[in-house]
Amino acid sequence: MTLSFYLFLVCALTCWSQYAAAYHATSTDTLTVGFALTVDHATATIRHNSTFFEDLAKVEASEEYIKLMQSPPYASLGDLWNDIPRQREREARKQKGLPASNDVAVIATLLKAIKDAAEASVGASVSALVSFPALPGLYQEDIVDAAYYIGLEKLAKGLARHPHELIAAYAGHGYDLCKSYNPVKRCVPDDGGSFATRTVLLAEYTQTALLLHLEGLNGAVELSWPNMYLELQFDLGSSRMPDEQDVRNSVLNFLYHHYNERLGRGPPNMTVILVGDPESVGDGKVQRATKIVLEALGAHAEVLADLKDIFDDWPRQAKRSMRKKLGLPASSEVGIIAKALKPVIEVAGTYAGSPLSALISFPALPGLYQEDIADAASYLGLHELGRLLEASHPHEDVAAYAGNGLGLCEDYHNEEKCREEGRNLTSRHTLLVEHTESALLLHHDILRESIETSWLDLDLATSFDLGSGGEPDELDIQDFVLSFLYHQYYYPTPHPPDSITVMMTGSFESLNDGKAWRVTKRVIEALGAKAEMLEENPNFIAARGAAELAWRALKLNEGGRS
């Protein structure tokens, strides 16, 4: 399955669910399908009335189609007026039952193939919208005419347009989808206000090309932008096995030109949506490039995960919601976490009173998610501190970073000034080393501000065989740390930083023998970097940082209300 398989979900989710229902009633057995065109393939998924999604098919594009994706745009607005004869020819061809143009015929060939596959799967004709990549020479009229030519039913008027890929992916991730979507005039956020504007960077990475599309969005609605800020590199398709530095340079040039050169300022924090072939996206190059570049330019990236995992996870999420409504922990895992938290919360309550204003730091482990921490906190009666970035329960490395006094703005009563100050802080390569009786945990990151962000994956390693309770040999610890850091900085080519900030956490008893400290310092220096060792109060440094971030979240909220 490709990540692009799920882009079309906005077609059913956004355009059909939100807008088509506003114009005509839908029978109980109506099925809708979303088709997603990319630069080199098409995908299809069906949406059932029960909000169940079923992936149907993927069809590879022809060389002719891929060549079409490289077509240049209109040179100027004058070309639109001079285009009237061509438009008349298109209408004449459509009246004769022909594709509106040769370009439409190429698109229709791929679209028909995926439509046939979808209809063969469901055993009936389908209604669908088509998402398509934002390319200089690809226009919505071509998509509309191709859909018309192959007999796709027009769902509705108004806002039910075939969406650009960025809009489709944005809605597919659940952003800015109102609940009251019938009639359209009621389709506003549930609090009656407007959706918050997000800066969104879509990165489509396939075997054929790397496409970057940048927009500011405050609603999952297809609009006609006079200009779109795009970058398309066919030389960086994964099949060409591009060097990671070339991918990074492409992202850097794209963002730096738009913000630093054109606008005279650095980029804002942004939501990054990765789509494309799993084989291409899975190598991590684009994810790492966007993360590193945005950090270097002074911004944070919220990188969105695989859509398939999100949609497959809906039954579990529904079960969690039901359990919470019944006053139960959201899951058995949440119950276990809550049981561990309850004693320390009760002790804190005797000192600070109730309700507590608190954040919970937690270790970066593959199977431990922030939703589990948030649900455990809610179950135990800890109230939310707001929706600012500082109000998120932080991973242990972020909390320890703050606990060591790093990444903290001085003016924390004013969000705008705090953000501006944060963008001028120095980014650091960091390594969290948590050593307890049960395990040795390593977590590598690049941090500038002490703010929790969502990454597609985490650079970490955990060994439950190297907990101090097992009295591990120092050489075994050294092999573990060396293997982890060598992969970070010497694979596939050497690129160690000048310095790595090491934050020691865990139990005092486990760290007291000095093994983890000595090994980490020795390995970093052997790899050609300086080790800045932070070892103060390892038992409580993360908790101290979480308390600091909770304090700042409250002060920032107070500043926002004043």
Image (cartoon, rainbow, N blue to C red):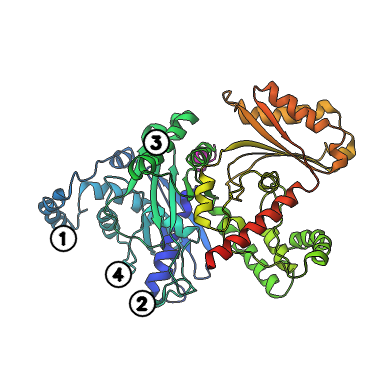
Sooner in the amino-acid sequence: mark 4 or mark 1: 1
Q: Is residue 160 above or below residue 453?
A: below
Mark 4 neighbour density, 10 Å: few (under 14) some (14–19) many (20 or more): few
Closer to the observer: label 1 or label 2? 2
Tell me the amino acid under the disc marked 1. Answer: Gln
Who's the residue at 70% across and 50% down the image?
A: 545
Sooner in the amino-acid sequence: mark 1 or mark 2: 2
Which secondary structure dominates the residues rendered in magenta? helix
Sooner in the amino-acid sequence: mark 3 or mark 4: 4
**Residue occupied by mark 3:** 253
**Residue occupied by mark 1:** 95
Sooner in the amino-acid sequence: mark 3 or mark 1: 1
The percent coordinates of residue 181 (x first, y second) are 43, 74
Q: CA distance from mark 2 to mark 3?
A: 46 Å
Q: Which residues are magenta?
A: 278-283
The question of residue 332 being in magenta is answered with no
Give the side of residue 170 with respect to residue 474, left or right: left
